Image (tube, rainbow, N blue to C red):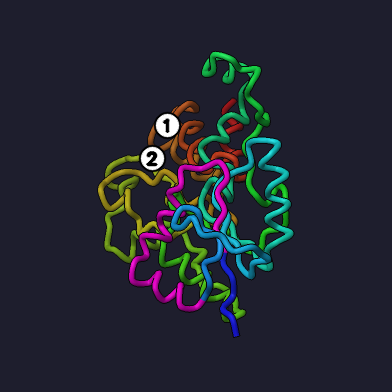
Amino acid sequence: MANPKLAVWKFASCDGCQLSLLDCEDELLAVAGAVEIANFPEASSAIIDGPYEISLVEGSITTPHDAERIRDVRAQSGVLITIGACATAGGIQALRNFADVEEFTRAVYATPEYISTLATSTAISDHVKVDFELRGCPINKYQLLEVITAFLQRRKPNVSAQSVCVECKRKGNVCITVAHGEPCLGPVTHAGCGALCPSYNRGCYGCFGPKELPNTASLAAWAKQELGASDTDLKRLYHNFNTWAQPFRDQGQAYD
């Protein structure tokens, strides 16, 4: 019996999440033994036609061609998993959604009339049905392996929905907000990074997007009252890698 076919697709992104899969190294051999990597241009020029049992999609939808292509990907895929901040929340490029994209195009390109782009950068789930969203900028490779394994075994992925604060506590980190007065998105951000930034005395930037039911308004109010954060500070904090994720988007826009 043939192994399930796995495809990896790229849209508007930096390729960092695809590199996380390649960075699995020894673990990737186990994945390759369980699936047939049929379409992964980042790793091989060899392409096997679909349909595919599992598709991993990196990147956001930013052009009319992207919007058409993702529908084709969905039609070929049994399970479609989006990976990374671009695919799950529009990415850093979604900052265009708050501005005039035509003005940006004129400023950047000498002949803007040749540029075909949408006014927005949006998540894959805004266009097609998504079976699972794996957050991160970039994703955690061990979470990715868990998600792939879970779908191969037809079970629910065991990916924590806790906040970065839980990871900080597990590592024994002193809270940098309380101890050092540093603004930090840890209380409202999905776990997965291992509390990387707080471990080096830097506030969380929200790379893994909003956790479930995040109280962004309360955190912002506390930062203003206790840390003296300005509206501009808070807007920049929430308008970052996951700027178009609804909880971060709404809180950032509260300061317009």
Range of magenta residues: 7-34
Closer to us: 203 or 96: 96
Eyeballing the image, is 230 above or below 164? above
* Residue drawn where x is 43% and y is 61% of the image: 21
User: Crowding near pointer 1: few (<14 within 10 Å), some, many (20+)?
Assistant: some
The answer to whether 185 appears left or right of 87 in the picture is left
| Badge 2 amino acid | Pro
Residue 183 numbered tag: 2
Sooner in the amino-acid sequence: mark 1 or mark 2 = 2
Residue visible at 41% across and 67% down? 142
Element carrying mark 1: loop
Q: Are marks 1 and 2 in contact (CB under 8 Å)?
A: yes
In the rendered image, the vertical position of residue 225 relative to residue 103, given as above or below: below
Residue 85 percent across, percent down from the top left: 52, 48
Query: Looking at the figure, which quarter contains the C terminus?
Result: top right
Q: Which residue is mark 1?
A: 229
Identify residue type, mark 1: Ala
The numbered dot on residue 182 is none
Quarter of the image for the N terminus: give it.
bottom right
Q: Nearer the viewer, residue 32 or 47?
A: 47
For the question of whether residue 214 can be seen, the reply is: no
